[in-house]
Image (tube, rainbow, N blue to C red):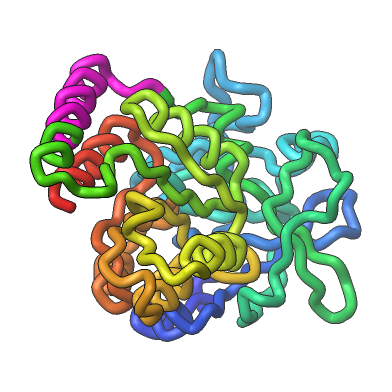
């Protein structure tokens, strides 16, 4: 299955144009098609013999040794509440890199990769409830395709730490107080340490993680579910002729989001004179060689892989201190 993937150089041509490539797959006993962003996928392999380990989460079917690396294999059908895939013969493992780690996802079949515009990727329908594992939906060949919220699945199986270390919290208090004193001395109108942080992320888990971390170091957040919603709110903030730097301290944005991705959001912000100079952190579970190059290409200030609360808190403190 490795021949279905393009090279990293070819894939980066998609990014920055508000486009993405979606790998389509199916689960055992389900007619529904599902999708996962190709940027998160390393390769697809036929399911080898799995080694069952004690005390694993029930959703983890076992460990596969692939290219001399032991990889936990998650039964996606089980994780999505579709029932356990009993027979792994003829099945495939999608090996993906999320949030600084590599996982394998057991699926019954893999179909093809489709190139799409993020504007065709829409948020889940209202009324599906908080327990669903969709991060977005789209239509392909007239059929609804669900794009899964892998971060939510991984948070259930192996929750990420969400607490900022005490020493970083105390350091933030000092920085914020220093910022306040500097504002008073300069008689400036705006204390940037007191401005809210704009957060754009389609994952409810990620939004909760970021908000909790920012609250711990003394910042409020404006939460948005995708790049388009974030950009619309930013435009509202500067509609009175003010500069964005006087309304928002900085922007923390995911990369892959429905309607508008984080790279496109960054490029649009940089092109808007009213938003000039705002600090942008791209904060994403995407991992790969292309990310640093893309950060420079679209004009972001920093790139941080998800999710380490201390690292994110330090990055925010550095940005505020230098503003």
Above-or-below relation of 38 to 80: below
**250 left or right of 156 in image:** left
Spot occupied by residue 100 in the image (x, y as percentages of width and height) = 36, 44
Q: Is residue 301 above or below residue 126?
A: below
x 32%, y 23%: residue: 164
Q: Position of residue 235 (x, y in %)?
A: 52, 68
Q: Residue drawn 46% across and 61% down?
A: 255
Q: Is residue 166 left or right of residue 61?
A: left
* Image quadrant where residue 24 sits: bottom right
Can residue 37 be spotted in the picture? Answer: no
The foreground one among 103 and 158 is 158
Tell me the magenta residue range: 163-179
In the depicted view, which residue is nearer to us: 267 or 191?
A: 191
For the N terminus, the image quarter is bottom right
Question: Is 109 placed left or right of 272 in the picture?
Answer: right
Corner quadrant of residue 204: top right
Main SS, magenta region, reads helix
Q: Residue at x 50, y 40 (%)?
A: 64
Residue 321 falls within the magenta-colored stretch: no
Q: Residue at x 30, y 39 (%)?
A: 312
Can you give x and y, in whole percent of width and height, for residue 189 in the image? 26, 49
């Amino acid at each position: 299955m490795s021949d279905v993937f393009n090279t990293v150089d070819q894939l980066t041509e998609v990014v920055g144009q508000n486009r993405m490539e979606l790998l389509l797959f199916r689960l055992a006993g389900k007619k529904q098609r599902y999708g996962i962003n190709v940027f998160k996928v390393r390769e697809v392999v036929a399911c080898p013999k799995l080694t069952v380990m004690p005390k694993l989460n029930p959703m983890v079917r076992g460990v596969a040794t692939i290219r001399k690396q032991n990889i936990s294999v998650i039964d996606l059908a089980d994780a999505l509440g579709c029932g356990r895939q009993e027979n792994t013969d003829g099945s495939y493992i999608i090996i993906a890199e999320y949030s600084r780690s590599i996982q394998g996802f057991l699926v019954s079949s893999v179909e093809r990769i489709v190139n799409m515009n993020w504007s065709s990727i829409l948020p889940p329908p209202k009324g599906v409830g908080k327990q669903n594992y969709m991060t977005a939906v789209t239509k392909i060949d007239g059929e609804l395709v669900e794009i899964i919220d892998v971060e939510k699945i991984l948070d259930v199986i192996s929750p990420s730490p969400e607490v900022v270390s005490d020493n970083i919290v105390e350091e933030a208090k000092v920085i914020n107080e220093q910022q306040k004193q500097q504002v008073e001395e300069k008689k400036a109108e705006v204390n940037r340490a007191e401005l809210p942080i704009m957060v754009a992320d389609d994952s409810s888990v990620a939004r909760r993680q970021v908000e909790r971390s920012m609250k711990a170091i003394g910042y409020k957040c404006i939460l948005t579910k995708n790049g388009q919603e974030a950009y619309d709110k930013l435009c509202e903030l500067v509609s009175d002729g003010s500069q964005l730097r006087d309304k928002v301290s900085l922007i923390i944005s995911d990369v892959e989001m429905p309607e508008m991705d984080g790279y496109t959001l960054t490029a649009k912000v940089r092109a808007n004179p009213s938003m000039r100079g705002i600090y942008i952190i791209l904060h994403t579970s995407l991992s790969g060689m292309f990310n640093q190059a893309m950060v420079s290409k679209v004009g972001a200030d920093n790139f941080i892989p998800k999710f380490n609360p201390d690292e994110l808190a330090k990055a925010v403190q550095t940005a505020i201190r230098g503003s």
